[in-house]
Amino acid sequence: MEFFTDSNIQFMKYRKYWMILSIALLLVGAIEVLFVGKLNLGIDFAGGTQLTLKFSEPIEIERLRDIVAGAGVEDAVIQSFGAAGVNEALIKTPVVEGSQEGSQALVVSALDAALDNLGPGIDLNRVGRETVEALLSSSDPDAVMAGKERYGPAVDAILGFRRERGLIEDWGSISALPQVTPAILEALEAGARLGKFSILGAENVGPQIGSELRQKGLLAIVSSMIGMLIYIWIRFELRFGVGALVAVLHDVFITVGLYALLGFEFNLTTIAAFLTLVGYSVNDTVVVFDRVRENLRRARSTPLEETMNVSLNQTLSRTVLTSGTTLLVVGSILFLGGDVLRGFAFILTVGVIVGTYSSIYVACPFALLWESMFGRGARGRRREARATSA
Amino acid sequence: MKRGLLWKGVLIGLIVLVGALSAYPLQEKIKLGLDLRGGTYLVLEVQTEDALRAETGKDLARLVQELQDLGADTVSATRTSATAFDLLGLGSDHATDLSTVAEEFLPGWGYQRRDGRVVFEMKTQNANLIANQSVKQAVETIRNRIDAYGVSEPVIQRQGLQGNRIVVQLPGVDDPDRVKKLIKNTAFLDFRLVAYPADGRGASSREQILGNYGGRLPDELEIIAGPIRDSEGNFVADQYYAVEKVSVITGRDLKDARPGLGDFNQPIVNFFLTHEGGQRFGEVTAANIGRGLAIVLDGRVRSAPTIRAQIRDSGIIEGSFTRQEVEDLSTVLKSGALPASITYLEERTIGPSLGQDSIDQGLKAGLLGLALVVLTMFLIYKVSGFNAVLALSLNIVLIFGALAYFGATLTLPGIAGIVLTIGMAVDANVLVFERIREELRHGRTVKSAVDAGFGKAMSSVLDANVTTLLAALFLFQFGTGPIRGFAVTLSVGIFASLFTALFVSRWLFDLILSRRQRVDHLSI
């Protein structure tokens, strides 16, 4: 199957309109980011605490909100997490004033109190291996005085079960484990209890680290762009470097704008996605420029505009194919890759589409624009103009 | 077959074999990041100011002591900051004594006279040294504690050479809260003789103690509070003791500490003293039979039993502890005290069940993406598509081989990186194949079209990959944790795809073309 074998699309003919479209899109993105929308900064950058909890019974988000607010933790974002019916919730709270260590302890103890989750005995949904082992060896259900080793397998089985399910809901579920004998179960029921929720994940980023990550992230994106500009400047010429840089800025701003508009969260993975996007966008542009350079060597007298048109047509099928295969991959992550990778895949999906467009309609026109303003021909014309006016 | 082709084939085979062997078996060779296998990642900061403050206090006391020994009875000193103090009341007749003492005992300090006082400031170099030491010691102490707790493959690292941050990674910990407390526990233990009240129980208020001393506490005493607990270990109220300022022994004099059970089956800590500590403890206890001995932990009196006989080299610490508390306390006492307190700046705990979901979904998406790409290649390039797909498969083998070889950790963004590399790896093939098609359209023979295709596409392929590599390098430089994992997989993927697209794929074409004398048609 072959595409575009003899295509002769006049890409550069209507470049003014495309440039206007791009600038408009870019402005919309920039305005959205800078003035309109409040960026949804994740705890990586804003600092704060994020807890992922699993409850043994369905719990209403409103109720959670009341409990957390009752603990004196303000502005919490609470949402249900994962598939329906798994009773998982995500609680995100901002930085606690004057503390690096966050709100985890506050929130958890408020939940314990509100859900009546206190009481004698260890909470099997929260304690670790050692604690369970200690309980069993002290109550010694098998009455053998054998010490910790004897109950090791049972403890492993119970905690393994918890690890897999996230939460032990009732005693029945662990009594089914072969290692848990009736005697052991009895000892556990006497000395332990099953808490009403477990902590699947807990992340806290103090304000200090948050601001550092913010700076580093921005620095990474800006310095990578400068790095690319320099590389292209050395490998090609300044005018191409400028074209590529404008194209990258264009892609990043449009994607950021769309990303922010849809309310996705900005976190460390987002920075990784944007850096990849920068790489991809330049990659795509470079292939076109490479062809332009090759064609320029062959036919020096042809105007740059026409050479660009020819080169764009020659590389068109490659452009479409590579974008296509990359889209197939990032698209499948977008739809099947799960919650954690969704933002990442979204950025790349949009980025690949916009990046392909910009290699054609942004990078080349801007290289042309630069050439007409500062290029050799332009300089000559300016000198003439100065001479006649004098 | 030409010799060159044969050798290239052998080389390719060897490289792929090494890659495959280093990644086999996959489950054992590829380390999963904390975000995938579950675990805790902590960044903590050592409050080095604590260590400086302690050092200043020690030096200050030493200076006053030495000057008083030389007859300057009126001197006293007050600390003004973590690294500075003022010396007051030094008569002019002791001016030379000051310089002798300062030179001999406080070499790390600078001082100058200022309206009747002598202002001492710690030299920056000395302060840096102490701060640096305290971080090093904290790393050691934390390592001891985590080892004692029993975590497999922990990572405990100082961040940077001079920084006061420590990164701790604990894979598969199922009780992160307990470990966090264990690490942070300063566990500063000391034993002090009790002056009042004499019966082992504390006074109910500070005022009661002050009343006993006529309103002013003697200089050698201080008041320390401690909790009263009920039989279930719940806090009831504070009680107060007047104890001597000088410790009999401290945590540093301990050789070993073990959890145990007391006479009433209550949890206690058994401790064993070093030779020196035992001697000192023996002397003091022998001389003070019948007096109370306060066991002070982190500035709180945990219990104040009465000394019944001389105690030489071992004893017990009791004080309404829970079982878990005595276990953790013995661990901490054994590992030594932290030189300074610790603040957690960042914590990420990911439960294993969260990680498993992510792996499953990431893999499913990756496999589907891969299948779609393979299908597309066959659809578009027909038989030559096989060439691209083979290059792609080798690419994946090499990526995993390199990850295993460098001991890199596979993180969730890392999986995305591999999947993305798959999408982009075919780019190099596409560039070459499109060029070959173009040359064929210009009427070249198959052989020369292949030659020209590879030759002309080379610079595009290189430029395109260098730019992506640049992005990966910046990611590595500025990223942390999982993001670095992504940068590593992306970079490894770029090298692998350059090798497979330019070398392996070329070799395959040459191999096919060398079989026949004249090739009229290429399925591309």
Image (spheres, rainbow, N blue to C red):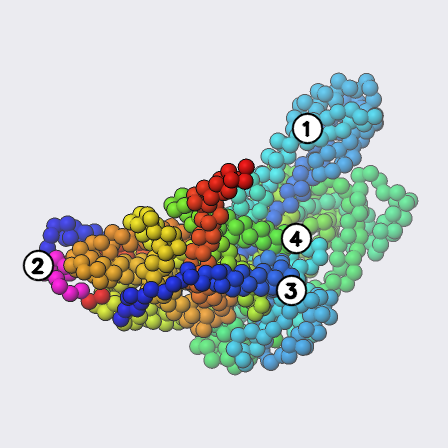
Chain hosting mark 2:
B
Chain hosting mark 3:
A
Question: Mark 1 and mark 2: span between their CA atoms?
Answer: 88 Å
* Contact check, label 4 and label 1, Cβ < 8 Å: no
Q: Which residue is mark 2?
A: B517
Residue located 78% across and 19% down the image = B95
- Residue B313 lies, with reference to residue B454, above or below; the image says above
Q: Quadrant of residue B426?
A: bottom left
Q: Which residue is mark 1?
A: B109
| Crowd tier of the residue under label 2, counting other residues whose Cα lies within 10 Å: few below 14, some 14–19, many 20 or above | few
Q: Quadrant of residue B368?
A: bottom left
Asked if residue B507 lies left or right of residue B206, the reply is left
Which of the marked residues, 4 or 1, is nearer the chain's N terminus?
1
The mark tally for this picture is 4
What SS does tag 1 mark?
strand
Q: Mark 3 belongs to which amino acid? A: Val
- Region in magenta: B512-522
Residue B369, position as x, y percentages in the image: 37, 69
Residue A316, position as x, y percentages in the image: 35, 63
Question: Mark 2 and mark 4: span between their CA atoms?
Answer: 92 Å
Which of label 2 and label 4 is nearer to you? 2
> Do the residues indicated by labels 3 and 4 lie within the same chain of the protein?
no
Residue A312, position as x, y percentages in the image: 36, 59
Residue located 90% across and 48% down the image = B211
Q: Mark 1 belongs to which amino acid? A: Trp
Quick one: B44 or B517, which is closer to the camera? Answer: B517
Residue located 27% across and 59% down the image = B435
Q: Which residue is mark 4?
A: B317
Question: Mark 3 and mark 4: span between their CA atoms?
Answer: 62 Å
Residue A36, numbered label: 3
Which of the marked residues, 2 or 4, is nearer the chain's N terminus?
4
